[in-house]
Image: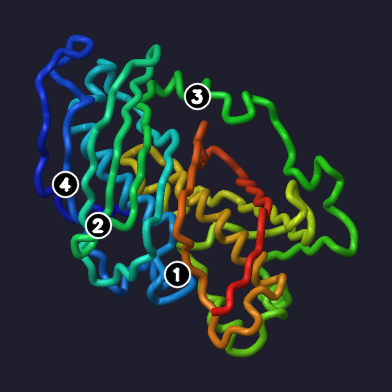
Amino acid sequence: LQLVTRVLEVTGVEKGDFHGVDCNPGKGTMVAEFDCPSDAWFYKAGSADSHMPYSILMEIALQVSGVLTSWLKAPLTLDKDNLLFRNLDATATLVKDVDLRNKTIVNTTTAKSYSMLGSMGIHTFHAELAVDGDVFYIVDTSFGWFLPEVFLKQTGLDNGKKRLPWHKVEGKGRGDSVSTYNLTDPSDKKRLYANAPGSAASCIRRRDGQASFVDNIVLIPNSGKHGKGYVSGSKIVDKQDWFFSCHFWCDPVMPGSLGIESMIECMELFAVNQGLTSGFRCPSFFHAEGTTKWKYRGQLTPKNNRMDNEVHIKSVEREAD
């Protein structure tokens, strides 16, 4: 999952004294590159040869922040050895969807601020990805440095309240309109793709392996908070899953980007089930230009047994092409 090939330069670093450490973590810009091969594993596991999963795009943009925060000595301000580094939130804008195969992606990341919030260090960054001189992805994001015992007390977005998926709370998990699929069962998967026959089905059946993060889904059309559709996905956590050993060194945790990828996967499955791919000779899934926001409070580690997600469809639009 290492998506930084080389660091070219670091500029704008200023001396300072922060909590007794000879550093100024809020100042500095790092320029790095990633040489993106055309046969990378994430292309083969995605929905098209030229389609980079959104989680990979996120990781390319965010990983330089992880290098820069250490370069600027931010973790030393906590004066501890055993620290956790976690992404907290971001606003990301896809300026344009670019075919990145065999391209060198230039990542320019600037530290915006650094502050202590109790026993946590909060580092904010601005990152821009460019290829052939054109910026195509912009991210403003914040990370936190945590003592393990502090992070374990995080209560999550629900302030520690345990809750069931929306369809169970609302009592909508039963009835003729509800479809359930076990994606590990070939016959169930065939039933899911029944609305995309022939060549269309083969074109959109690509996502699997390392880019698939859903085992089962519950799909309800004309439902959800907006009445346009609802999908809930779940995955049994494999303690040996590939990302646990190659994300943070000696700190097994599922990247938040892969949680977001699981939601995008649910959106794709909703589109297939509802016949939205009909009328296309060989349909593919791509990212729409625009802004995506995310917020994380918590983590998924090998200690967890199951991951659940849910997606509420807000709108479906079909254009002439």
Q: Residues within 10 Å of mark 4 (few under 14, many from 20)?
A: some
Q: Give the residue number, with chain letter if any, for mark 2.
A: 130
Q: Is residue 211 left or right of residue 265?
A: left
Q: Residues within 10 Å of mark 2 (few under 14, many from 20)?
A: some
Q: Give the residue number, with chain letter if any, for mark 1.
A: 45
Q: Position of residue 304 (x, y in %)?
A: 57, 40
Element type at mark 2: strand
Q: Position of residue 136 (x, y in %)?
A: 32, 58
Q: Amino acid at mark 1?
A: Ala
Q: Amino acid at mark 2?
A: Ala
Question: Who comes first in sequence, dot 1 or dot 3?
Answer: 1
Instruction: Please identify the residue farthest to the top as the structure is shown.
Output: 20
Q: Give the residue number, with chain letter if any, for mark 3.
A: 152
Camera-near label (1 vs 2) is 2
Q: Position of residue 26 (x, y in %)?
A: 23, 25
**Residue drawn at (61%, 61%) of the image:** 267
Q: Which quadrant holds the C terminus? A: bottom right
Q: CA distance from mark 1 to mark 2?
A: 24 Å
Q: CA distance from mark 3 to mark 2?
A: 37 Å
Element type at mark 4: strand
Question: Who comes first in sequence, dot 1 or dot 2?
Answer: 1
In this view of the protein, which residue sits in the foreground, 177 or 239?
177
Camera-near label (2 vs 4) is 2
Disc 1 to disc 2: CB gap under 8 Å:
no
Q: CA distance from mark 4 to mark 1?
A: 29 Å
Q: Give the residue number, with chain letter if any, for mark 4.
A: 31
